[in-house]
């Protein structure tokens, strides 16, 4: 029988400007993903990011290894995904 892949959407926001660029977002996402993978058996994570949000794009693509899988022009939204092996 085919099993359903468990997936989760990730969002992170560092609202206070003085706390940005201190790797808090990366550490938070990594902690959430570790918990989700080990405790909840999540195998696919995805994030939807506005195409002008360069900080989030760098975080998910460059720092966390997510890959672009979709783009929605009407919302100017890029979807990135990460599969747990």
Image (cartoon, grey):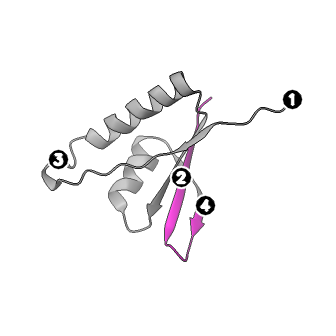
Element assignment for label 2: strand
Q: Which residues are magenta?
A: 71-85
* Disc 2 target residue: 80
Q: How far apart are labels 1 and 4 at the CA level?
A: 29 Å
Mark nearer the viewer, 2 or 1:
1
2 or 1: tag closer to the N-terminus: 1
* Disc 1 target residue: 1
Kindly give the residue lying farthest to the left in the view shown: 18
- The tag on residue 70 is 4
3 or 2: tag closer to the N-terminus: 3
1 or 3: tag closer to the N-terminus: 1
Q: Are marks 1 and 4 in contact (CB under 8 Å)?
A: no
Q: Is residue 17 above or below residue 51?
A: above
Given residues 9 and 54, the one toward you in this image is 9
2 or 4: tag closer to the N-terminus: 4
Task: Locate residue 40 relative to residue 19 in the image: left or right.
Answer: right
Location of residue 72 in the rendering, given as x and y in whole percent from the top left corner = 57, 69
Circle 2: is it few (<14), some (14-19), or many (20+) Cα within 10 Å?
Answer: many
Q: How far apart are labels 2 and 1 at the CA level?
A: 29 Å
Mark nearer the viewer, 1 or 4:
1
Location of residue 45 in the rendering, given as x and y in whole percent from the top left corner = 55, 42
Element assignment for label 4: strand
Would you say the magenta stretch is mainly helix, strand or loop?
strand
């Amino acid at each position: 029988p085919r099993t359903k892949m468990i997936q989760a959407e990730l969002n992170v926001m560092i609202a206070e400007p003085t706390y940005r660029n201190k790797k808090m977002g990366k550490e938070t996402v990594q902690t959430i993903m570790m918990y989700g993978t080990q405790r909840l058996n999540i195998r696919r994570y995805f994030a939807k990011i506005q195409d002008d949000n360069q900080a989030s794009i760098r975080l998910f693509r460059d720092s966390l290894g997510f890959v672009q899988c979709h783009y929605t022009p009407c919302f100017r939204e890029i979807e990135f995904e990460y599969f747990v092996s």
